[in-house]
Amino acid sequence: ELQLQLHDARQSSESLSYQLENAENKARWRRLGGKDPEPDELAAKIRQLEERLNDKKEQLLEKELVLEEVSNLSDRLRKEASDGRSDTLELAKKVNEFQSKIKDTTKRMMATVAELSMYQATAMKLQQDRHQKDIEVEDARWRLEHGQPPTEDAEREFYHMERERMRRREEAIRRAE
């Protein structure tokens, strides 16, 4: 009896897996609405994001240089403090101040890096969108060259407009009679 239950469970599992993996299953996907940006808009957005990305990279480099300079000063002050060349208390205050500045700069740098990553991800997504749109445009051109409607949506819209035109025409004929 356990073998029979195991067999039934495996068949059920295979059936569910097939339904889940079947791309023809209309219940597992839906068309998203909205307006797709034009390739020119995508290209402009990519250029804008790349400019912002470059600006952020420059800012990051500047902050890295500041961090390096502050670290060098901090190291030098620590060395002086350990050598006993100056007032230890004053140096300790300066070291603490520099360390605080380093922490603040590091936090800002990390925020900048995170923002930079977001812009890179957005740029990559826009490039993928543009590539997809290019494929759709090429497909539409091919369909037009072969006497087909450019897209299924365009064909449906055409038939809808034709039915509407015929309905108005019939209505005008009825009114004229």
Image (cartoon, rainbow, N blue to C red):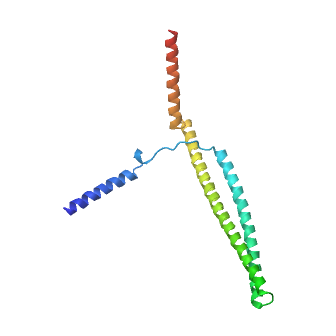
The residue positioned 66% from the left and 64% from the top of the image is 111
**Given the current orientation, which residue lies at the most extreme right position?**
86
Q: Is residue 132 visible?
A: yes
**Is 95 situated above or below 47?**
below
**Given the current orientation, which residue lies at the most extreme left position?**
1
Q: Is residue 153 left or right of residue 130?
A: left
Q: Is residue 71 left or right of residue 7?
A: right
The residue positioned 51% from the left and 24% from the top of the image is 164
- Residue 102's spot in the image, x, y percent? 71, 73
Image quadrant holding the N terminus, namely: bottom left
Looking at the image, which is closer to me, 84 or 107?
Answer: 84
- Residue 79's spot in the image, x, y percent? 75, 86
**Is 38 situated above or below 160?**
below
- Residue 122's spot in the image, x, y percent? 62, 55
**Given the current orientation, which residue lies at the most extreme top position?**
177
Q: How many marks?
A: 0
The residue positioned 53% from the left and 30% from the top of the image is 158
Looking at the image, which is closer to me, 99 or 73?
Answer: 99
The residue positioned 73% from the left and 72% from the top of the image is 101
Q: Is residue 147 visible?
A: no
- Residue 15's spot in the image, x, y percent? 32, 53
